[in-house]
Amino acid sequence: MWQIFVRWFHKCSSPKWFYQMSKPWSFWLGWAAFVLIGVALVWGLAFSPVERVQGNSYRIIFIHVPSAFLSEAIYMTIAIAGAVGLIWRIKLAFYVAKACIPIGMTMAFLALATGAIWGKPTWGDWWVWDMRITSMLILFLLYLGLWALHNAMERPESGDRAAAILALVGVVNIPIIKYSVNLVTTLHQPATLKFTEKAPMHISMLVPLLLSILGFYLAFLAWMFIRARLEILKRERKALWAQKEIEQLGGL
Amino acid sequence: MAFESFSAFLKMGEHGLYVWLAYGLATIVVLFNILGPRYLAKQLVKDHQRKLRREQA
Amino acid sequence: MIAILRTTLTREMTLAFRRRADLLNPLFFFVVVVSLFPIGVTLDLAKLALMAPGILWVSALLASLLSLDLMFRNDFDDGTLEQMLLAAVPPQLLVLCKIISHWLVTGLPLTVLSPVLSVMLALPAKAVPVLMLSLLLGTLSLSLIGSVGAALTVGLRKGGLLLTILIMPILVPVLIFGTSTVQAMATDQPWQGYLALLGAFTAGAFALTPWLTVAALNVTVGD
């Protein structure tokens, strides 16, 4: 019984298996994400009613919330993948972590930028040193640090391990973001979407928001698979199957 | 439809600049994440061909 | 084990005192930076008093960061670091000794100097003991967390700059807790909570960072 599990574990951690397995997934997830995000944004921009207090600027929420959620979720993914890579020495985990970094960085940037743009008509200022905004800025800086560390090391394997260690050190920031809004309520409103309670948002705004969140999550998975595949090809270049795949890519 | 006309849709009740700026940034980010890997793939193929040529020479 | 700690700590301190110029640099930096703020921002004592906790804390952190790179550099350059990792003694202990000696030589003097500088910034006298307590814990946190960054970057060419960028995001909670403690004390509000949080953070760092630093050293030495 245990042998079956061990064999499955080894198969799943093989870069070649991941490469083949993820191709159809990234294709379908990508198109599903496109449809979901398209529907969500068209609905949210054109069909959701005007909000009583904020007017039309609230429509930025359909971009702001998904990107904020994603930037945190992606960071946790990087930290967990890094830990898996360090503890069990699975190269694939490192490839996945490295693939997530640019996506997470752009999501954190988008969350900060759309937050600032939304903040101007709502609170009057482009930037406020609110706890949640500050924590999100720190998260963005952590992503920058991860990327810089990868590029600074001589060997890519060292970059993997160094970035994994840095990601683990920075994990302390995630609970701070999550609970900072509860601890210190300054300007940014507390969490509206909770798993346990009914959301106080109107259904015509809630549904496009949920669709958008789901769409962005699927997009992240699709993008991550694509980048991870490229990283696999780059690192496994010496293997014959990888060379064949690169030649196929070149032929496209 | 929450808006009476297309121009009202673009203006977004005087918040047009903010909403469209935000959505524009989102589009750029999404495009970056879609086109970035394509560029990386081309680089990978070029590097590979260069290395093959060097090894065969 | 106590004997090992004692010998290692003594050795680290002896080595540190041989580079006297490096010891004084952070202190000079601290004094200069704190002096620049009144000159550059405002000479109004009331406004300075408001900003004093933050200025003192940021300057102390930056001054500590200056000397962080030295924690492992000399040993990395002459190969002692690899020997340290291969020794029979758990490397976490040796790393902890390095961290403590860095703190004794950098953080502690900064903390001792801070009351003098707090006068320059018109910090209310009642807040000074709390300031010192918070800086004591904060500089210890910095030495602990900074050791991970120092371990990651000691082998790199532009290591020093990257170190600052890497460590800054994780030091922000320390900074926030530390300055909140002093500000609360200065404005007669409950400060014990913030100090407790700072203490908890430092304790957590004390428990976890030696392991992370050793892992980082293994990566650097193997690079």
Image (spheres, coloured by chain):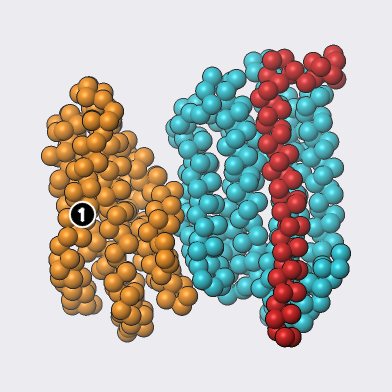
Chain colours: A cyan, B red, C orange
The image shows residue C159 at horizontal and vertical percentages of 40, 62
Q: Residue furthest front?
A: B57
Name the quadrant containing residue A25.
bottom right
Relative to C216, is C137 on the left or the right? left
- Quarter holding the C terminus of chain A is bottom right
Residue at image position (42%, 66%) is C157
Name the quadrant containing residue A60.
top right
The image shows residue C91 at horizontal and vertical percentages of 34, 75
Residue at image position (77%, 82%) is A240
Relative to C219, is A241 on the left or the right? right
Q: Amino acid at mark 1?
A: Asn
Instruction: Provide the chain ID for the residue under circle 1.
Output: C
The image shows residue C162 at horizontal and vertical percentages of 43, 57
Q: Where is B18 relative to C166, above or below?
A: above
**Does any portion of residue A225 appear in the rendered image?**
no
**Does any portion of residue A156 appear in the rendered image?**
yes
Residue at image position (57%, 23%) is A120
Residue at image position (63%, 39%) is A110
Camera-side residue of C207 and A15: A15
The image shows residue C76 at horizontal and vertical percentages of 34, 74
Q: Secondary structure at mark 1?
A: helix
The residue carrying mark 1 is: C25
Name the quadrant containing residue C46.
top left
